[in-house]
């Protein structure tokens, strides 16, 4: 797999997060040029510096572009900036998300709209604006990070799960539209992964779910990142429109 992504340009949203920072490491180690995005500029720069320190022989470049995806212009600004820096986009990893639990009767329309913007509309806009460049370079890989929550139906997660379900349906249908054009679109649905986001959930709820995981442990962010690296590569050219669950066997 070494250097399998040389010359490719990858956008990673949510690169400051637990899973996103490991995805950045994976794609950079595979040789890609990467665009790191998140809201925290200082964290983005820290991640960039860490990547450059890990292996000075790597040939890919890393740039940081802080954005808030709740802003309707964020996707367009990100794509424009990527094109002005690199001139192409080959890989898009929609990983950023708003993770928040609320009981259904406390889920206001405003809350739902905010979640839809960050978890669904921004990834959709990024897909729409990146695909023309993928078509031009005859290489496109879109990897959308969804969640086990959308298929499992976890209490308190109605808004979050609905946005992830919408992103899943979108991915499958758009994958069918571009299947003949060297573009693949897949979803990775993580189970419970050890990041700060996991700790937003009440400890009893988390521990109860953990007991149901056949592997008897939470997942590690790098266990998501390694699959992103594979799906982004030429080796995964016939995997399209799929949802790949990475959850230690937890499924119901
Ligand atoms: N951890 C789990 O157990 C789990 C389970 C299922 C699915 N997932 C999915 O995995 C993905 C990564 O989650 P994680 O666990 O790594 O969470 P995390 O550590 O909390 O990271 C979330 C990332 O999303 C970014 N983000 C959030 N709101 C944003 C906004 N308005 N604009 C721009 N960026 C924003 C954050 O950026 P800043 O911090 O810079 O604001 C951060 O980089 C998400 O799609 C999540 O739904 C996680």
Image (cartoon, rainbow, N blue to C red):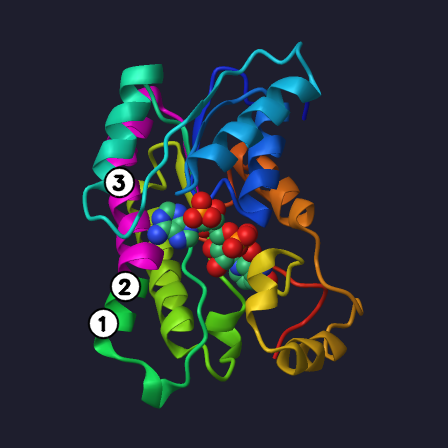
Q: Do the residues labelled 1 and 2 touch (CB within 8 Å)?
A: yes
For label 2, count other residues whose C-alpha is less than 10 Å away and answer few (under 14), some (14-19) or many (20+): some
Q: What element carries label 3?
A: helix
Magenta highlight range: 116-144
Q: Is the C terminus in the top left, top right, bottom left or bottom right quadrant? A: bottom right
Tell me where residue 152 appears, x and y as whole percent: 53, 77
Real-space Cα separation, disc 3 to disc 2, in angstroms: 15 Å
Q: In the displayed structure, would residue 194 be above or below residue 101?
A: above
Q: Mark 1 points at which residue?
A: 110
Q: Is mark 2 on a helix, strand or loop?
A: helix
User: Is residue 111 visible in this depiction of the protein?
Assistant: yes
Residue at x 32% of width, y 81% of height: 107
Outermost residue toward the front?
42
Q: Residue 129: within the magenta?
A: yes
User: Which mark is drawn over residue 75?
Assistant: 3
Tell me where residue 157 appears, x and y as whole percent: 45, 77
Q: Mark 2 points at which residue?
A: 114
Residue at x 42% of width, y 41% of height: 38
Which quadrant of the view contains residue 163?
bottom left
Q: Residue 52: within the magenta?
A: no
Tell me where residue 230 appears, x and y as whole percent: 60, 37
Real-space Cα separation, disc 1 to disc 2, in angstroms: 6 Å
- Which of marks 1 and 3 precedes in the sequence? 3
Toward the viewer: 177 or 31?
31
- Which of marks 2 and 3 precedes in the sequence? 3
Which quadrant of the view contains residue 114?
bottom left
């Amino acid at each position: 797999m070494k250097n399998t992504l040389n010359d490719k340009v990858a956008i990673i949203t949510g690169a400051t997060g637990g899973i996103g920072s490991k995805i950045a490491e994976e794609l950079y180690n595979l040789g890609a040029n990467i665009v790191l995005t998140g809201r925290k500029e200082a964290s983005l720069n820290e991640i960039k510096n860490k990547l450059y320190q890990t292996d000075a022989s790597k040939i890919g470049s890393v740039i940081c572009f802080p954005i808030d995806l709740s802003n309707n212009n964020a996707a367009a600004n990100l794509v424009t900036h990527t094109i002005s820096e690199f001139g192409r986009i080959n890989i898009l990893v929609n990983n950023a998300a708003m993770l928040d639990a609320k009981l259904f009767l406390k889920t206001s329309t405003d809350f739902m709209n905010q979640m839809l913007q960050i978890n669904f509309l921004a990834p959709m806009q990024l897909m729409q604006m990146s695909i023309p460049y993928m078509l031009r370079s005859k290489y496109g890989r879109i990897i959308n990070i969804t969640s086990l929550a959308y298929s499992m139906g976890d209490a308190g997660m109605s808004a979050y799960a609905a946005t992830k379900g919408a992103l899943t349906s979108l991915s499958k249908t758009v994958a069918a539209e571009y299947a003949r054009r060297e573009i693949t679109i897949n979803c990775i649905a993580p189970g419970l992964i050890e990041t700060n986001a996991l700790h937003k959930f009440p400890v009893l709820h988390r521990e109860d779910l953990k007991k149901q995981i056949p592997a008897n442990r939470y997942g590690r962010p790098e266990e998501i990142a390694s699959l992103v690296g594979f799906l982004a590569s030429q080796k995964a050219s016939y995997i399209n429109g799929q949802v790949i669950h990475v959850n230690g066997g937890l499924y119901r």
